[in-house]
Amino acid sequence: MRVVIVGSSGFVGQALMLHLNNQGHKVDPLSIRKETKTQDISDALQSCDILINLAGVSIFGRWSASYKKALYDSRIDTTKKLLDALIMSKKRPKIFISTSAIGIYPDEIPCDEKTENFSSSFLSQTCQDWEKEAMRAKELGIKTSIFRFGVVLGKSGGMIKKIWLPFSFGLGGRIGSGRQSLSWIHIRDLCYIYDKVIKEEREGVYNLCSPQPTNNMELTKILGSLLNRPTFFPVPAFVLRLMFGEGADFMLHGQKVYPKKLLDLGFEFKYKDIKTALSSFL
């Protein structure tokens, strides 16, 4: 099938493009900017079978007022443009998979897809607005799914790429108290979840995270042990706040999230526990 990915230049987008190409699909990237015309987007979506939306500025940055606006606009405005283009399209994709994040949920409370008590944080509100915009696709007769990402683990990007070097030199350590929950998913499992939902033409909201959440302290100890390095250099909360401002909150707090719907569908996670996942990067 022909797959179009919006936001393909990031860590997840690059891995997913390679994976879907290897599965025999024809995968095309689509870049949407402020100046991109809706008609041009609609033209690019002709003969598209599967549309995947990964667009969004990285949350790893200092959350100034302007950065928060970019975080929000890059998700909501881009998705709105995409949906407006779909309305104009004569031939629409069969399946639309948009992205969200487990940051939609409250901190430290066990949650699954049935949880309706969302956090009041900026990140949660962004996710709620993002999902609402994406769900407009259902009104067009397109099978629509929302993937709420946990922390995606892969050596070529995301959190692991940022911490690998300091840990390798024995300069790693817990973040803040280290007790904050970490709901995560291995990049390979993530890619195979896309396969399953596409092949079975599933709809709905799915939590993309391992069935065994961990916490920052456990990840720190296991990674240090695997690399045979000490982990004596904690990153205090005040340092993170100096670096990231309000953005430090998503590193100092965590969600304990479970992928109930995927388990109910019989999806088999290859990387269920954090030690197995981290070992795969050695």
Image (spheres, rainbow, N blue to C red):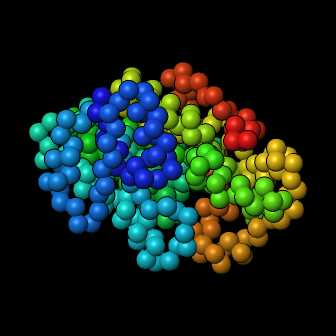
Residue 183 image position (x, y, % from top left): 64, 45
Residue 110 appears in view: yes
Q: Nearer the viewer, residue 15 or 249?
A: 15
Residue drawn at (46%, 78%) of the image: 65
From the viewer's perspective, tell me whether residue 263 is left or right of residue 21: right
From the viewer's perspective, tell me whether residue 238 is left or right of residue 13: right
Residue 277 image position (x, y, % from top left): 69, 38
The total of numbered circles placed on residues is 0
From the viewer's perspective, tell me whether residue 88 is left or right of residue 228: left
Q: Nearer the viewer, residue 131 or 209?
A: 209
Instruction: Examine the rendered structure and indicate whether residue 114 appears above or below residue 239.
Output: above
Residue drawn at (62%, 50%) of the image: 255
Residue drawn at (52%, 73%) of the image: 63
Residue drawn at (14%, 43%) of the image: 89
Q: Nearer the viewer, residue 174 or 281?
A: 281
Q: Quarter-wise, where is residue 257 in the image?
A: top right
Residue 112 appears in view: no
Q: Which quadrant holds the C terminus?
A: top right
Q: Quarter-wise, where is residue 94 in the image?
A: top left
Residue 193 image position (x, y, % from top left): 49, 32
Q: Which quadrant holds the N terminus?
A: top left
Instruction: Examine the rendered structure and indicate whether residue 227 appears above or below residue 189.
Output: below
